[in-house]
Image (cartoon, coloured by chain):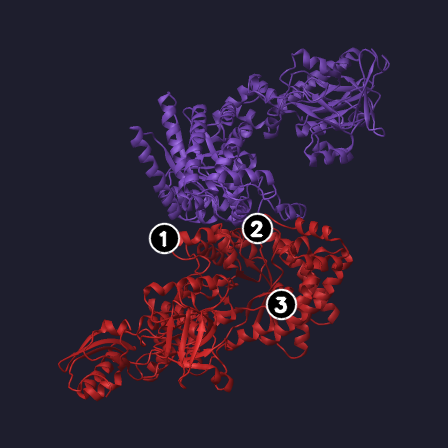
Chain colours: A purple, B red
Amino acid sequence: MVFGNMGDTSGTGVCFTRDPNNGTPELFGEFLINAQGEDVVAGIRTPRPIAEMNDVMPDVYEEFVQNTKILEEKFKDMQDIEYTIQEGKLFMLQTRNGKRGGESAVKIAVDLVGEGLIEKEEAITKVLPEHLDQLLHPRFPDVELQEYKNAVVSRGLPASPGAAVGCIAMSNEKVVENKEKGIPSIMVRDETSPDDVEGMFAAEGILTARGGMTSHAAVVARGWGKPCICGCTALNVDETKGEITISMEDGSQKTYKEGDFISLNGQSGEILEGSQTVAPPAITGNLKTFMDWVDQFREIDVLANADTPPDAKEARKNGANGIGLCRSEHMFFKPERISKVRQLILGDAKQEEEALQELLKFQREDYEGIFTAMDGLPVTVRLLDPPLHEFLPSLKEQNVLEDCAEQLGITIDELKEKVEAMEEVNPMLGLRGCRLGITRPSIVEMQTRAILEAALNVIDAGVDAKPDIMVPLVGKVEEFRKQKSLIQNVASKVFEERGKSCDYKIGTMIEIPRAALTAHEIAEEAEFFSFGSNDLTQMTFGYSRDDVGSFVPDYLSKGILQDDPFVTIDTEGVGQLIKMTVENGRGVRPGLKIGVCGEHGGDPRSVQFFSNEADLTYVSCSPFRVPIARLAAAQAAVQKDMKK
Amino acid sequence: MVFGNMGDTSGTGVCFTRDPNNGTPELFGEFLINAQGEDVVAGIRTPRPIAEMNDVMPDVYEEFVQNTKILEEKFKDMQDIEYTIQEGKLFMLQTRNGKRGGESAVKIAVDLVGEGLIEKEEAITKVLPEHLDQLLHPRFPDVELQEYKNAVVSRGLPASPGAAVGCIAMSNEKVVENKEKGIPSIMVRDETSPDDVEGMFAAEGILTARGGMTSHAAVVARGWGKPCICGCTALNVDETKGEITISMEDGSQKTYKEGDFISLNGQSGEILEGSQTVAPPAITGNLKTFMDWVDQFREIDVLANADTPPDAKEARKNGANGIGLCRSEHMFFKPERISKVRQLILGDAKQEEEALQELLKFQREDYEGIFTAMDGLPVTVRLLDPPLHEFLPSLKEQNVLEDCAEQLGITIDELKEKVEAMEEVNPMLGLRGCRLGITRPSIVEMQTRAILEAALNVIDAGVDAKPDIMVPLVGKVEEFRKQKSLIQNVASKVFEERGKSCDYKIGTMIEIPRAALTAHEIAEEAEFFSFGSNDLTQMTFGYSRDDVGSFVPDYLSKGILQDDPFVTIDTEGVGQLIKMTVENGRGVRPGLKIGVCGEHGGDPRSVQFFSNEADLTYVSCSPFRVPIARLAAAQAAVQKDMKK
């Protein structure tokens, strides 16, 4: 024994009934002889593992272990316990469900079902969306490689899992300054206090020299799912000099300055030199088991917003039931395409036609890749949406302007005039979406042809392609009718040319308040609806997302807004339009497929509204957030069930 | 007799039973011996006045006069008749209610009541809003002055009344080109045909050398209420040279080129050199009688949008029941004020305070003038609405930037940086309205103080001031609550300082879709609502008024839009929100005063919706359109009555 006096019969500590980092069903806690709990939490003294209590006072330890079992059975969850021992007598001071990291939340949920303590349905409620978010953070894939091992310079307590890479920063100011420049930081401190929260929050990860698994840094970082390594005793932090020194195992020292890059493996506690390679996580093991349960309970589909074949593959890996939004114009920005897009927009009739032919090839290839990745699942392609001037060169980019003018065979001044003529006062409310599709039908025709030719091509190769063509920014049913007839004409031509056809649907975004108000008319024509909840929020509130920075923070701090309406759906205003749309749309076309493809589709509280109150068919979100949306949908279903 | 053969017994012509220009109850028509009606309408031959038929064939004329009386009694309106005489026998070929100009429409309506042919209620339906529009066009006030008389160079047929001033233009292209440059045109043609309609429409007035009172130019111009002089035989139009020549009474000739200014008095048929002074019309005589009837029938109030004391006086003269929208910031652009406004926006705390004090004085004076003009009627003042950057100098105005930088004691570069920092991507959806009032409360405080101090000042002078303070751009009731409490605090201070108080109301604009959707909450707090139907249309449709030029014309021509929604209210979409707001608002606060102050308030079809379907308390429109809105409101009430 290395601490205390063997004859001591008093002690204090905190203990989790399972490991809050990885969920291992063993006591996980700390024990200080003759100390107050506060000292443990503050991390001022580094305590000893709880198992060592058994060496000092085995009877007390035996009683403690029995107590933890009783508490877990009673509360059906992992417990976080404060205890004290006075003159050999154990007092359980407090118990509550323990906070945990993502990995442990999933393991504990799965284990509790295995141990017969809870049902699957309850297990689903024990993993928070934030937990999954942590698990879906990138990890180091190369931990077995020698190169990785060589980069390890020290180890600390693995206080919060995940991989973090950033440059050393020792103050709130430095972290925030880096973040504004787009540079990731690792906040390195001797120990942290509430004063450091701003920097900790903005940092990718946290490293401290002092403090245990329940120190301020550890507790806070776990709450956020941010990688953290605590109590790295080999670390010396010199804020005055702006450098850190690490005592190496061979007795030498390594010094790093603020701004040098390091990497933290919050899983293993390893601290590494430089920027190590990170990779997305895989859904395997307990997480796979858990997500399978999730899918048994949820009542709505979860689709992904994916614009490229790699995105589509990622989405499928994450369990997406299809693609709810393919913003095909995102592919227009690739270097070899953007010049063709500019030629299409600014060129004469011949140049436009030539550009359309080139873009048709690119788009067809994209769609082939996406249909193949999503074999058997629906792929919803939105026709061109943004204002065309978004694709034009900035008037400040002289060399781009030169290239573009040369390509078009016009002078730079003529080009500038054309670019300026396309500027809009409020581009958000200007010539975009189907307004473009109606005034410049050739783009819609090219995109439709690309979608359907791609579908026929991959069907030939045995793929089950399910294209859904989505018309953006409809406000009047007449707009939809015009676009639908255009699409159907192209389809007829393509099918005739190819001597065969395929199934496809034509639907619309509901993102203009007027579309929501006239959903009963639009549903007569459209085969599916998808709420563009970002734009619907912009127009229902009259907020431009690009400009709200000047007042929304003030609104949040003054309590005028409870939530940022671009993060969590405004159920009262925007939600009212959504419910009205669903009711009126299905009134005309029973069973109408209705989804949402704004960013709210990946927000758990919004998903609950979409599932339980709006009765949508699906939500669609970024591939990365698909598992979170699946969980949120399952929790919504379980909650609805409990209310019955 | 100067025409035909006295022995002729055939003829043809068209005839109005009253004068379609001024309403005089005498036959007004034309008569051609041995000619077809088509020749008359085409203006190819200049026919003789109908009264001369009496000289040629008195029996036929006697029969004709009797027939016109029978027809007027049967149809209870002025008739437009085609007739032919074959071998002494009169055939009435066709009759219909005759088209008429504004002056005659009013006189005929008043006369028909006087003659006992119709009731007042029916008379109201006989004057179209377009007729009033014509009467409310400017006139030449100086016709009795020698200066005016000296400017008269010729006379033609007074084919359509009103005063027009513009430069000579001989082709559609020239008129349209002028219009684009903001230059008014008079379209001058030998005679007009349907090919000339584009130029005629864009011109201020029309002058032809040939054709009578029922020629193409005359009929079309009267339909539009556009001044027109036809059949000016002294005029010679040389399109090739681009000049016109007028043969003067003294035998001399005057030549004018395209681009020279002339003036037309459509009332008298006088053609004048140069730009003559024009003045607004007065509501007197028949028009006064008619408008008094209008006010007896209408069920909603008509207020005016007026920003200055002269506007307010004009509004009252036109019969406004108050001011529904005083955009106080319109007064900020006056030269002596704009620099203070810029100091307020960009200055430091001391400069801001100083600017507020100066602006307080200006605003108080403005409000005193407006309250005095509207003695006894409500004056609704909207607090600052537009984005602040609208008041800042353009980055291109170097000398304004210099002055502004000097005033603020900063460098031009610093100033440019401040101005650039305030630019917004979508200013329409950015920091404006109550968002400004909440983030920069000092402006609201100053404006509230100016309003209430002005009210107390004029009340001291015996004026009955009725201030309504209106908070713009509310989307959440919390925004309104904050602004209301700010206003109430200022009111308490002012009333305490002055040792007396006055009545005032605090209400809000409903112009954000979310406000309409949560009207039941906002009505708990607001004492009145006013629809900002321009903004509500922008956001419900997702159309920026500044940018719709790129697609709305296309939408109108393709039938996607039946009407421009910024001219005539979209009853289906925007109207649905309006009706919902009225129902939910009055559900909470019975009898809630609800008006509309967008430009739709002066559009007759929109007024009918606001009166009969939306059940609003009032519409508010530009002072100039108040009589039209009064008529539209009366017609709506009569129509509703007829449906019962």
Crowding near pointer 2: few (<14 within 10 Å), some, many (20+)?
A: many
Q: Which residue was labeled with disc 3?
A: B504
Element type at mark 2? helix
- Pick the front one: B120 or A258: A258
Return the chain for callout 3.
B
Q: Quadrant of the N terminus of chain B?
A: bottom left
Tell me: B463 left or right of B594.
right
Task: Note whether B606 is above or below A314 in the view shown.
Answer: below
Provide residue B612's location: percent of width, then percent of height.
Answer: 41, 64
Q: Which residue was labeled with disc 2?
A: B429
Say which residue appears at 44% left-offset and 65% top-offset.
Answer: B603
C-alpha gap between disc 1 and disc 3: 46 Å
Element type at mark 3? loop
The disc placed on residue B559 is 1
- Pick the front one: B70 or A111: B70
Tell me if residue B644 can be seen: no
